[in-house]
Amino acid sequence: MLTDHLRRFKEAVCEAAGREVVFGTDTYPPSFSLLVGHNYLESLTWSGYTSPLISHAEIFILATFASNADLFCRWNSGLEETDALQLVYWLYGYDHLGLPQTLEALGVGTPDLEMRFEKLYDIVALELWRARLYNDGSIPSYPVIKGATWPKETVQRLVQTTNEIGHDGIIYQGTESILDYPGV
């Protein structure tokens, strides 16, 4: 659904401009994209680039885990929270990362979660790998990561991982974690 609407939007822009226009969009984290109607492979046929939006790890990834686990528990009153989280991690291919075993430990909605989340690098790096696999290289890929509120060491590791994987660049949301501004 999303991909079709974005393709039609791009076609309308090009028609209105009377020429081809470079057009791309943020994309959902790959592990979740098909479940929300975003088909990466289809978007390669019309988009000028992919831009995996993995800068909001709490909202797109951790909150999805928490809400899915909560939903599973409400659907089955005998299901333990720990088991529901394990099922969710398995469903999205995160079961090997050793993520928190309770919703409270997951910490969604707590202040500065991403700054202190022990597995932030692991979950973002996993999405970087999957984004590179989904984009076959026929169009550029510029993942979006936070360069402002994530720990500097995490950002530096993610930059290195992004380069090693073969993305074409990075779009930073802020740069305070990676650049020093004298006098600021």
Image: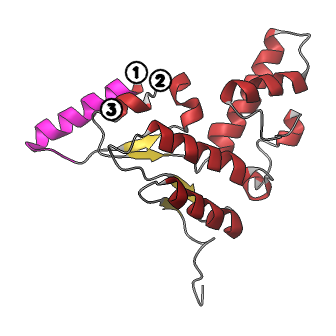
Q: Earlier in the sequence, mark 3 or mark 2?
A: 3
Q: Which residue is mark 1?
A: 1
Q: Position of residue 162 (x, y in %)?
A: 54, 57
The magenta stretch spans residue 70: no
Q: Could you tell me the amino acid type at mark 3?
A: Leu
Q: Position of residue 131 (x, y in %)?
A: 51, 42
Q: Residue at x 63, y 70 (%)?
A: 177
User: Does 102 sit left or right of 113 as displayed?
Assistant: right
User: Does 114 sit left or right of 184 as displayed?
Assistant: right
Question: Dividing the picture into quarters, in which one does residue 20 lie?
Answer: top left
Q: Looking at this view, name the residue that lies furthest to the bottom.
A: 183
Q: Residue at x 70, y 36 (%)?
A: 63
Mark 1: secondary structure: loop
Q: Which residue is mark 2?
A: 37
Q: Could you tell me the amino acid type at mark 2?
A: Gly
Marks 1 and 2: CB-CB under 8 Å? yes
Q: Which residue is mark 3?
A: 6
Q: Residues within 10 Å of mark 2 (few under 14, many from 20)?
A: few
User: If the image is split into quadrants, where does the C terminus sit?
Assistant: bottom right
Region of the chain picked out in magenta, as a range: 3-21
Mark 2: secondary structure: loop
Q: Earlier in the sequence, mark 1 or mark 3?
A: 1
Marks 3 and 2: CB-CB under 8 Å? no
